[in-house]
Image (cartoon, rainbow, N blue to C red):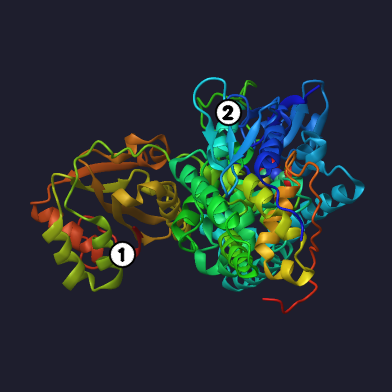
């Protein structure tokens, strides 16, 4: 099993993607290893969603948090899903459910929030990378919409960085796969 | 250095959109000339200066600030693109070219056949439309299969392939691909919507509403655009500035100049005319009237005139909002052959096409060859002769004398009855009824 991208590693990937200078020191808290960021001014920030949103604003890329009220809400929803379900689940069964949920959601969408690339896509990509790496060709075809989305996001400029490139076959191998 | 230059086109031309969207990605600066006084479609593009630069006289056409000229919408879009849009490897570039050509050869022809009649710019042919629908279904199937596993057509970024196909599919999605038809092609719609929502597309296309109900052939719009075409063929009226040359007798041989082209291509250009902003309604200032002309026309067309349509007329006629007129052709001695006289009447009706919502008439030819007269009864919106309201309408009315009728008078009642039914003595004429024409 590939190792999950989590905590400081994930936030550093995000920093680089956002073009931030880096240098932040991250720690983890508690049994669930919640990331924390100590800031110079004010109290420390706690939790992936909070810190990631902070970095996005720092980089002045607020559009990554959604533009309309609706988009913002959907971005929040998937960040929440990422933190609770993807980070929380580890069984085969959990993984199946996540892939099924996402596959359904992405059937008629290019990005998690619909038509635009957001922080939700970035963090979901980092969160799922270790799962996607291990999928068989049949599984990738079964979760076709997730595969299409994942492949698109991993090619999005600056996203993948040192993570391994997951290979997808674009022409159907198993024509009867459902 | 970024490309900059002028794009000649008619307004809202989907072919020009390709270059305009590409320019949004590349930062090329395009000055669009699509409206008078700088550019008049059908005029400017047929001038010798234009033809020297663009021998086909077609738009879109691009002229760079450095003098470089190129026509054909795909070539223009290519020129103003970035390397990424064109495809940065030979394979990607070939795939882009594949889809650009696919759009032109497999999408545009059936799309035009299906969509143009719904815009009133091409005559409807049921069989051709059905064949076109199936072809559209087929190409959507091909695209859907391709986009099942892909976000964009080539690679993982927007390319000229997406730009070209989105533009080629634009009218289909706006006019006829209703939710039921596009249902099986969810991958295409997902891709289409995502492209439309890219800021670069949005900047050019604005908000695009996908079709809710499949548009059908619009006979009325078709008649209107035909009438406009007719009008367009007439020689320019006196006082019509625009040409600086001194007025010559002969009109430019425009028709002969035209090379034969596939019917579709020709008719597509009339999109421009169809898209012309609607002229202001010259009756807009009148208060609402309870008399519904269309309802009367329906009765007149479908039911017995004497027992149904006439009573309906007098029951509902609103003398405040409408007026009745008697007209007589001033030069009966010039009327020779009856068929020519009939053409005189139908020609007038055609020129008054836009008045149909606001007028109804029965105009009758009396007598025989070399001994005839023309007179008629008009129902007209308002209390004035509407002809003065619009220059198009003034062509014929000076050839007639006009007399307002008093709706309460017995004379008026009997004129209306005789002219609407084409029966009776027509005592005021003194010649037998030959034939009648209804303006409705
Ligand atoms: N294949 C050409 C088609 C261009 C074309 O047919 N243009 C028509 C307008 S739809 C035109 O300019 N016709 C000249 C005229 O009718 O005056 C392209 O994509 O640019």
Residue B181 visible in image? yes
Secondary structure found at label 2: loop
Name the quarter showing ligand 1. Answer: top right
Marks 1 and 2, how far apart at CA? 101 Å
Residue at which label 2 appears: A38
Above/below status of A62 relative to A109? above
**Eye-nearest disc, 1 or 2:** 2
Is residue B330 shown left or right of residue A77?
left
Q: Quadrant of residue B30?
A: top right
Residue B120 visible in image? no
Q: Quadrant of residue A64?
A: top right
In the depicted view, which residue is nearer to us: B129 or B417?
A: B129
Query: Dot 1: within a 10 Å radius of its alpha carbon, few (fewer than 14), some, or many (20 or more) residues?
Result: many
In the depicted view, which residue is nearer to us: B128 or A166?
A: A166
Residue at which label 1 appears: B433
Subunit of mark 2? Answer: A
Can you name the residue that lies furthest to the front here? Answer: A31
* Residue B48 tag number: none
Subunit of mark 1? Answer: B
Q: In the image, are marks 1 and 2 on the same chain?
A: no
The image quadrant where one finds the C terminus of chain B is: bottom left
Above/below status of A143 relative to A125? below
User: Percent from the top left, x then y, of residue A156?
Assistant: 73, 44
Residue at x 77% of width, y 76% of height: A174
Residue at x 15% of width, y 55% of height: B317
Residue at x 51% of width, y 63% of height: B178
Above/below status of B16 relative to B115? above
């Amino acid at each position: 099993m590939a190792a999950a991208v989590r905590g400081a590693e994930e936030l550093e990937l995000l920093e680089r993607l956002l073009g931030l200078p880096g240098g932040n020191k991250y720690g983890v808290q508690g049994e669930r290893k919640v990331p924390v960021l100590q800031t110079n001014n004010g109290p420390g920030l706690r939790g992936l969603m909070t810190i990631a949103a902070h970095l996005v604003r720092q980089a002045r890329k607020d559009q990554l948090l959604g533009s309309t009220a609706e988009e913002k809400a959907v971005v929040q929803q998937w960040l929440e899903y990422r933190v609770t379900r993807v980070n929380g689940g580890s069984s085969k069964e959990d993984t199946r459910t996540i892939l099924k949920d996402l596959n359904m959601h992405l059937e008629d969408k290019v990005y998690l929030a619909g038509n635009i690339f957001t922080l939700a896509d970035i963090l979901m990509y980092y969160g799922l990378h270790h799962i996607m790496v291990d999928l068989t060709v049949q599984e990738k075809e079964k979760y076709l919409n997730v595969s299409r989305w994942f492949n698109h996001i991993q090619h999005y400029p600056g996203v993948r960085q040192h993570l391994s490139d997951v290979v997808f076959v674009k022409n159907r191998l198993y024509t009867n796969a459902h | 250095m970024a490309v900059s230059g002028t794009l000649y086109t008619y307004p809202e031309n989907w072919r020009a959109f390709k270059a305009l969207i590409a320019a949004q990605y590349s930062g090329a600066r395009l000055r669009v000339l699509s409206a008078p006084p700088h550019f008049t479609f059908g005029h400017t593009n047929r001038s010798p200066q234009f033809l020297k630069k663009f021998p086909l006289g077609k738009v879109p056409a691009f002229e760079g600030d450095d003098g470089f000229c190129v026509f054909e919408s795909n070539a223009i879009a290519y020129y103003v693109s970035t390397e990424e849009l064109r495809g940065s490897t030979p394979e990607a570039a070939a795939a882009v070219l594949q889809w650009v050509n696919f759009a032109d050869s497999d999408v545009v022809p059936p799309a035009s056949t299906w969509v143009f009649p719904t815009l009133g710019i091409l005559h409807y042919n049921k069989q051709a439309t059905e064949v076109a629908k199936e072809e559209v279904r087929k190409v959507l199937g091909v695209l859907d299969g391709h986009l099942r596993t892909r976000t964009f057509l080539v690679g993982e970024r927007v390319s000229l392939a997406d730009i070209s196909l989105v533009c080629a599919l634009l009218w289909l999605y706006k006019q006829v691909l209703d939710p039921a038809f596009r249902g099986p092609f969810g991958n295409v719609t997902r891709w289409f919507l995502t492209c439309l929502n890219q800021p670069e597309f949005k900047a050019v296309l604005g908000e695009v509403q996908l079709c809710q109900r499949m548009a059908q052939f619009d006979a009325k719009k078709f008649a209107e655009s035909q009438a406009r075409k007719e009008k367009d063929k007439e020689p320019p009226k006196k006082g019509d500035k625009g040409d600086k040359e001194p007025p010559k007798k002969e009109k430019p041989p425009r028709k002969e100049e035209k090379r034969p082209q596939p019917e579709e291509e020709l008719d597509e250009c009339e999109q421009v005319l169809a898209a012309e902003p609607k002229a202001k309604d010259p009756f807009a200032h009148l208060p609402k009237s309870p008399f519904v002309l269309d309802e009367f026309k329906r009765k007149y067309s479908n039911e017995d005139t004497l027992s149904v349509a006439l009573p309906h007329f007098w029951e509902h006629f609103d003398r405040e909002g409408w007026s009745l007129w008697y007209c007589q052709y001033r030069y009966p001695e010039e009327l020779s052959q009856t068929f020519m006289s009939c053409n005189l009447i139908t020609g007038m009706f055609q020129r008054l096409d836009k008045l149909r919502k606001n007028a109804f008439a029965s105009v009758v030819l009396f007598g025989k060859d070399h001994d005839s007269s023309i007179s008629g009864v008009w129902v007209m919106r308002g209390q004035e002769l509407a002809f003065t309201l619009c220059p198009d309408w003034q062509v014929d009315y000076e050839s007639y004398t006009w007399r307002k009728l008093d709706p309460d008078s017995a004379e008026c009642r009997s004129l209306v009855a005789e002219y609407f039914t084409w029966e009776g003595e027509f005592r005021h004429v003194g010649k037998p009824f030959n034939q009648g024409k209804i303006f409705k």
